[in-house]
Amino acid sequence: MSNNTLQFITPKKQTTTPSTIDLYPSDLYVPIFKLLHTVNLHSEFTKKLTHKMEEYRRDIMPNMVNFATIISWGCNLGIGLMAKKSKNITLAALEKTSNWHISSKNLLEANEAIVALLDSMPINAVFKEDENLLRSASDGQKFMMALNSIHANYSSKYFGKEKGIIIYSFLSEHYPLTYTTTFSAGDFEAWFIIDGLLHYQPVLTQIPKKKEKPIKEGENQENEDDMETNRLHSTDQHGISFINSALCYLMKIEFQPRFKQIHKVKLYGMAGMPITQQLDYQINAGNNVNIKIIEEQWDNPSVLLKRLTSYSNKHPLNIALQELGKLVQTIFVLKYMHLEDLRRIINHQLTQIESMHQLSDELNLGHDGLIRFATKEELLVMARSKQLLINSIVCYNYLYQTQRIIEASPEERKEIQKALSNSAAFAYAHVNFQGEYDFSDEALNDILEVDMRKAMNLEL
C-alpha cells in the first residue's frame, strides 16, 4: 500500500548456480542463408512455397532463391536491393519467386512446418516451467512507414507526425512464434488476440482436476469440465478486455494479462456474493454481474464469435460475454493479487516477447528501418517472412544444442540443460544477417578502373 494505492511486489525467479558452459562459442558464426538451409533440411518448410496458380501448384523455386526472397522481405530490403547484394541469384528469379510463390498464406504454412518441428523436439522441455502446461504471450511492435498506406495510422506517442503499423506476434514459452499479423497503429490490440489463439491448436494431454473425494464405483467419470486448464495466455494492458476474458474461458484457455495499474481494475460480484468498497485498503468495486443474460445466451453457437465485431455493443450476446468476462477477470485479479509466483511467470512471459522484439529490430536492415510496403498482403508477407526468420533462428539453436547434448558426457549434458533453462532460444549473436565479404580474386574481375590522367584534366 502506497498513498492508499494497491501495489504488489513480484519476486524474481530463484537463481541457480551459473553454468560454465558456453552455449554458443565465439568461433560459431553462421550466415543466415546457411541457417535457413539447415532448418529446411529438417522441417522442409520450402515445400509450402508452392505456385499461386492451381495448375502450377507443384512448382517450387530453388531453395537458395526462396531463402534470398524471404530474407529480402523479412529484413525489409526489397528484392531490388537483395539482387544487388546477392551472388548467383538474379533479379528475375527473385521477382518470379516474390510474385508467384511468396504469399501470406504460404508463409503461414511454412512457419507452421517449423513450429511443428519445434513442438516435437524433446529439447523444448528445458524452456518450460511445467511440461503439462502451454504458456504463451502476445504483444505488438510498432514500425514507422516510409510510404502512405490505408493500413497505417498516426501515433503521436511513437511516430510523431508520421504513420505506422503494428506487427502483432504470439510467442509460446518454448520460443516458437506461432502466429503473426499486422494492423494499423491506431487499432486496439485486444481485437486480434483471439485470432492468434484460434490459429494455434496444439495437441495437449489434459489432466483431471484434483477431487476432494475419490470417485466411487458407479459415479460418472471426468468430463470436459472436470479437466484442468492447460493453456495459459498473457498480454500487457493493451490486450485486456472483458470479451477476451470471456472467450478465452469458453475456449478453456486461462487469460492471464499483466495489469499496469491494478488498483484501478474493477472487481465484480454476483447475487449473494457482492464485492463492496473496503475502508482499510483500496478496492475498486463494480456492480453485480447480470447472471440472467449469461444463462440466456449460453447456448449460442461458437460460429457467432467471428461476427462479434460487427455487432452493436447493445447486442445481447455481446452484453452476455461482457458480463461473463467481468466474472472471469475478477476471479483472475484475485489470484493475481494473491499469488506472487503467478505474477512472476506472467512477467517472464511478457519479458520473453519483448526480448524477441530486439531480434525483430536487428532484422530490420533496410531503408533506415522504415517499412516500404503498403498493401495489406505486402505487410503480412513482410511480417511473416520476419516470423519465419526468427523461427528459423530458434530452430537452428534447438538443432545445434540437441547435437551438443547427443555428443556430450552425462555431466556435460546436465550443464548444457542448466545453461539452456537460463537462456533464450532466440539467441542470435552467432548469426550473420548481413552476408559475407568476398576477398577472392574473382571478386576483383569487375573492379572500377579510372584513367586518372584524363580524370585530372577533365573539363566541366
Image (tube, grey):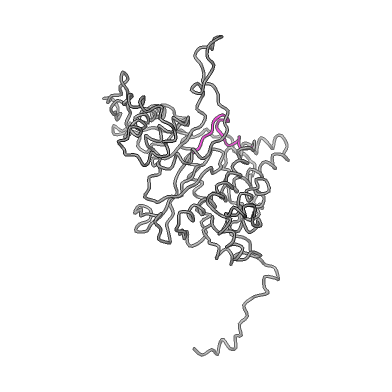
**In the image, farthest residue toward the front:** 55
**In the image, farthest residue toward the top:** 217
Residue 29 x, y percent position in the rendering: 64, 54
Residue 225 x, y percent position in the rendering: 48, 22
Of 46 and 163, nearer the camera is 46
| In the depicted structure, whether residue 276 falls above or below residue 183 | above
Give me the residue at 63% from left, 56% from top. Answer: 33
| In the depicted structure, whether residue 433 falls above or below residue 256 | below
Residue 313 x, y percent position in the rendering: 31, 38
* Magenta-colored span: 123-136
| In the depicted structure, whether residue 19 falls above or below residue 205 | below
In the displayed structure, does residue 262 sit left or right of residue 105?
left
Q: Is residue 126 magenta?
A: yes
Give me the residue at 40% from left, 60% from top. Answer: 148
Classify the position of the N terminus by image quarter.
top left
For residue 188, which quarter of the picture?
A: top left
Give me the residue at 61% from left, 82% from top. Answer: 450
Q: Does the magenta stretch include residue 70?
A: no
Of 52 and 404, nearer the camera is 52
